[in-house]
Image: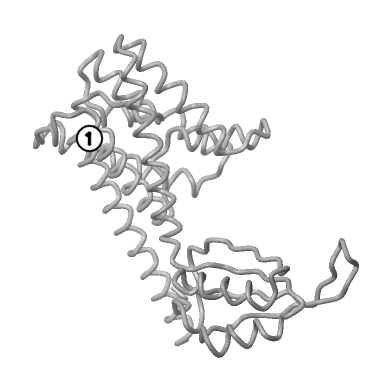
Amino acid sequence: MNRKILIDKIGLRRILKNLFLIFLGCLVMGIGYSLFLIPFHLVPGGIAGLSIIINYLLHSPVGLVIIFLNGPILLLSYRFLGKKYVLTTMLGMVLSSLLIDFFNEVIKLHRGTENPLLAAIYGGLLLGLGLGLVFRGEASTGGSDVIGMILNKYTGVSVGMGIMMTDFVIISASGFVFKNLEAPLYGYIVLFISSKVIDLVLEGWSFSKLVIITSLKSQEIADFIINKLDRSGSALKSRSLYLNREGEIIITVINRKQLAELKGFIKRVDPQAFVIVNDTYEVLGKGFKPIQTN
């Protein structure tokens, strides 16, 4: 019984956390659209970008148009992607749309800058931050990401490529509608920045490095990692494909400041060593971030 209560509490805590992330993300997006994107008619792609174009032509509220245009897409997502995806998408889409119109139509926030380039930069930052928080809350705001998933399921096109194709068409169309070749150029800036910020929110900063080392001096290198860098790792048996020789591969995770020190030591003890360095965005366990169960 106690275990069931604990599981229920963990589940409730997760739901509340996700709802908070979704609300905060939608709030940030609403501010970003009202301060930077809508006043300069900056089209970031997707249904929201198409809504800004319609707003320019018909002066209709952007959020209301987003809800209207997402209707058919939600029906498609229900048919092709399942009920759960529709519910979370509807929550993110409706909440973000209402907040966009609240800040832009009700409060009528004044534009955050008079410079369109600054508007594209900071609009992209806030849009990416907001979307990233919504995605971390296990929700979506609809639009081109749904189209990308449907294209992936039935045509084999990757989700990222499907989204990029959809966004490219919408952003490019803004140049013809606004009769301004700079309009899509600013839109591409917004799209690029927002995409990078989404990745940053979802993956985090890269403070650690994953290092994979193949060396004849593996024991010396392992001792250095343990005793000098105060890190640990794993040693795996390996066989060189080129030399057909048995050996060991050392796998370790260190912080960025330690990378130069480790590389310098490897260069001294075995200049012929083979070293692979990768960024790691999340490391869980002793010496790093504790493993969270909720």
Q: Is 189 or 5 nearer to us in this picture? A: 189
- Residue drawn at (65%, 74%), measured in percent from left and top? 251
**Residue sitting farthest toward the right:** 244
Count every numbered label the image shows and give the total: 1
User: Splitting the image into 4 quarters, where does residue 62 fall?
Assistant: top left
Colouring mode (rainbow / by chain / secondary structure / one colour): one colour
Q: Nearer the viewer, residue 148 or 4?
A: 148
Q: Quadrant of the C terminus?
A: bottom left
- Identified by mark 1, the residue type is Leu
Residue for point 44% across, 72% down: 257
Q: Is residue 196 left or right of residue 58?
A: right
Q: Position of residue 188 (x, y in %)?
A: 39, 29
Residue at left 49%, top 27%? Answer: 166
Q: Which quadrant of the figure has residue 120? A: top left
Q: In the rendered image of this protein, does residue 277 appear above or below residue 34?
A: below
Q: Is residue 218 left or right of residue 223?
A: right
Mark 1, other Cα within 10 Å: few <14 / some 14–19 / many ≥20: some
Residue 101 relative to residue 154: left or right: left
Residue at the outermost bottom position: 227
Q: Secondary structure at mark 1?
A: helix
Q: Residue at x 46, y 78 (%)?
A: 288
- Relative to the observer, which residue lies in front, 285 or 69? 285
The quarter holding residue 234 reads bottom right
Name the side, left or right, on which 117 lies relative to 236.
left
Identify residue for label 1. Answer: 118
Q: Nearer the viewer, residue 53 or 94?
A: 53
Residue 15: % across, % down: 38, 63
Q: What is the x, y in percent for residue 224?
A: 59, 85
